[in-house]
Amino acid sequence: MSFYIAGTGSALPEKVVTNDDLAKFLDTSDEWIRTRTGISRRHVLTTERLQDLAIRSAKIAMEEAGVSGADLDLILCATMRADTFTPSLACAVGEAVGSRAPSFDLNAACVGVLYCMEVADSFIASGKAKTVLIVSAEAMSKLLDWTDRASCVLFGDGAGAMVVKAGEGRLAGVLSTDPDTHVIRMPNIEGINSPYNQVEQEKLAMHMDGGEVYKFAVNAMGHNIEEVCKRAGLTPSDIDWYLPHQANLRIIDASLKKFKIDKSKVLTNIADCGNMSATSVMVLLDEYAKKGIFHKGDKLLFVAFGGGLTSGAVIIKWNKE
Ligand code: UT7
């Protein structure tokens, strides 16, 4: 038994920051950001809490799926930074939707939603769950070095959710890691108030070697697409819709080029949202689902890469009309 997607939702912060807004305090330009990345604007948290966005997106997905909190058997949240270390974001969402289901956060950087899908699949396959809420919420703006033009222009904040139910839908999945702790790194706080270990705190912001990440991304996305198609008994041209991680339009183009895929099958929203880490593919899915472009039986391929270095791909058959 695998799962199908029964409902989706998303929520973005109100504030929109354009490339020109960034050029007011950074040595950058709209032209550089658009041509190098495909990004024009992104949403950024101001006074909203991340968990409020997560809860809003979860409620939309649950209403669409026709499920209440009592129907959920598991809540998974993909995030790198919940509002609190504890409770987890998944517990905050569970409280808001009236669920007593086991709930936990999962950090696989930008690949988090794919990891959640595979965990949900295992719970469902083993009979431990029938209905799972998967949420992703990322506050990238709180993790960035806003003086580093090579990284802070790339990211945005947001949340998305999906309800998956036991049934035919997921065709195959692949997750992998090429361990590298240097090319993308965001230090955690070293600890406070310990009289026993006074450590010097590393700068609490993202450090990234963009060029190295770029090379990894193009290889990993291509490899994961080949592998997941093989596991599903399909070829890349059998896929109806590609939902790639929205890190850089040039990475998406370069990794899909060899498969000679019709560009209209490759969905993007990077121009308006930037890179929202794990949340990118969730918001992308919800946006295009709401536009009504998916039809029953369509094969959707999710593919992502991120810090760790993690990567993965999942193919799902769309079950709704
Ligand atoms: O979810 C995963 C997270 N990370 C990623 O996805 C990052 C993947 N990497 C990338 O997307 C690209 O490598 C970047 C967008 C980060 C950089 O693009 P690039 O084409 O690899 O540019 P570059 O690093 O080779 O830099 C070219 C020039 C440099 O100037 P010089 O040395 O040629 O004078 C940079 O200093 O562009 C400069 N530069 C900028 N200029 C204006 C870097 N960032 C900016 C900027 N505005 N924001």
Image (cartoon, rainbow, N blue to C red):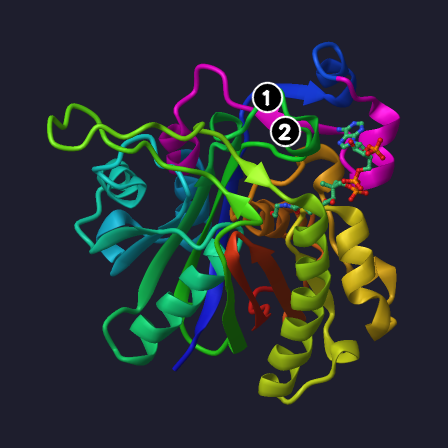
- Look at mark 2 in the image and give the residue it sits on: 152
Mark 2 packing: few (<14 Cα in 10 Å), some, or many (20+)? some
Q: Position of residue 192 (x, y in %)?
A: 21, 26
Decide if residue 297 is in sight here: no
Residue type indicated by callout 2: Cys
- x and y, in percent, of residue 41 in the image: 72, 27
Q: Secondary structure at mark 2?
A: helix
In the image, ligand 1 is in what quadrant? Answer: top right
Asked whether disc 2 touches disc 1, contact meaning CB atoms under 8 Å apart, the reply is yes
261 is higher (above) or lower (below) than 20: below
Q: Secondary structure at mark 1?
A: loop
Determine the residue located farthest toward the left in the rendered image.
195
Q: Which residues are magenta?
A: 27-55
Residue visible at 71% across and 70% down in the picture: 222
- Pick the front one: 79 or 55: 79
Q: Is residue 298 above or below residue 271?
A: below
Q: Which residue in the protein does label 1 denote? A: 146
Q: Count how many numbered circles sit on residues in the image.
A: 2
At horizontal 33% and vertical 79% (from top left) the residue drawn is: 125
Above or below 23: residue 196: below
Q: Give how far apart the Cα atoms at labels 2 and 1 are.
A: 6 Å
* Residue at horizontal 26 percent and vertical 37 percent from the top: 92
- Mark 2 and mark 1 lie on one chain; the one further toward the N terminus is 1
Instruction: List x then y, in percent, for residue 16.
Output: 65, 21
